Image (cartoon, rainbow, N blue to C red):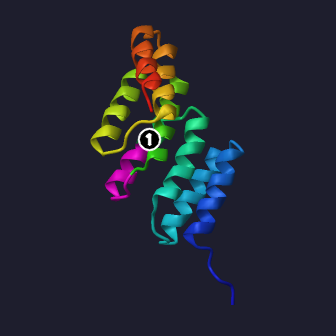
Amino acid sequence: NKKRPDLIIYSAAIGACAKAMQWERALALFHETRWKCLGKNARTYNALLLGLAQAGRLDLAGILFADMQGENVRPTIHTYNTMLTACERTGSWELALDYLEEMQAAGIRPGAAALEAAAGACREAGQEGLAETLHERLRSLP
């Protein structure tokens, strides 16, 4: 009698695929968790979001982020940092600022990783003034 893999195992497998830059396989495993009705949690979403961010697939990451919220899975600081990393890789500075604002509205204080990624998105898009403003915030962190 084989025991069915649970969400923890799937989350680990999705994370391993993401680290190996195999976001397509990670996405397939994510959909498999839904098909098998294993539930949803932030760890599973974050694992897939990381793979999408590393691949520069902000388009898919944004859809998944919206899906996460629609499923009432609360984004964590890791979720926002990952979305900001995706913004940095694609130079999506306006979206990065939106995620920073949303992060704060959710009661999550942006740390160094979030501010650095947002500043990187601004720099990538030629928004040097905004990047410098974010670096000033970064320097003022405790």
Residue extending furthest front?
142
- Horizontal arrangement in the rendering, residue 105 relative to residue 93 (left or right): left
Viewer-side residue, 41 vs 115: 115
Residue extending furthest right?
20
Residue extending furthest left?
105
Question: Which kind of residue does numbered mark 1 sit on?
Answer: Tyr
- Horizontal arrangement in the rendering, residue 106 relative to residue 26 (left or right): left
Residue 69 magenta: yes
- Percent of width and height locating residue 105: 27, 41
> Which quadrant holds the N terminus?
bottom right
Helix, strand or loop at mark 1 = helix
The relative height of residue 48 versus residue 44 in the rendered view (above or below) is above
Residue under the image location 61 percent in, 52 percent down: 26
> Residue 132, located in which quarter of the rendered image?
top left
Tell me where the magenta segment starts and ends, as one range.
63-74
- Horizontal arrangement in the rendering, residue 31 relative to residue 95 (left or right): right
Residue extending furthest bottom?
1
- Percent of width and height locating residue 27: 57, 51
> Which quadrant holds the C terminus?
top left
Mark 1 closeness class: few <14, some 14–19, many ≥20 residues within 10 Å: many
Residue under the image location 46 percent in, 62 percent down: 41
Residue under the image location 58 percent in, 73 percent down: 6
Residue under the image location 44 percent in, 45 percent down: 77
Viewer-side residue, 37 vs 135: 135
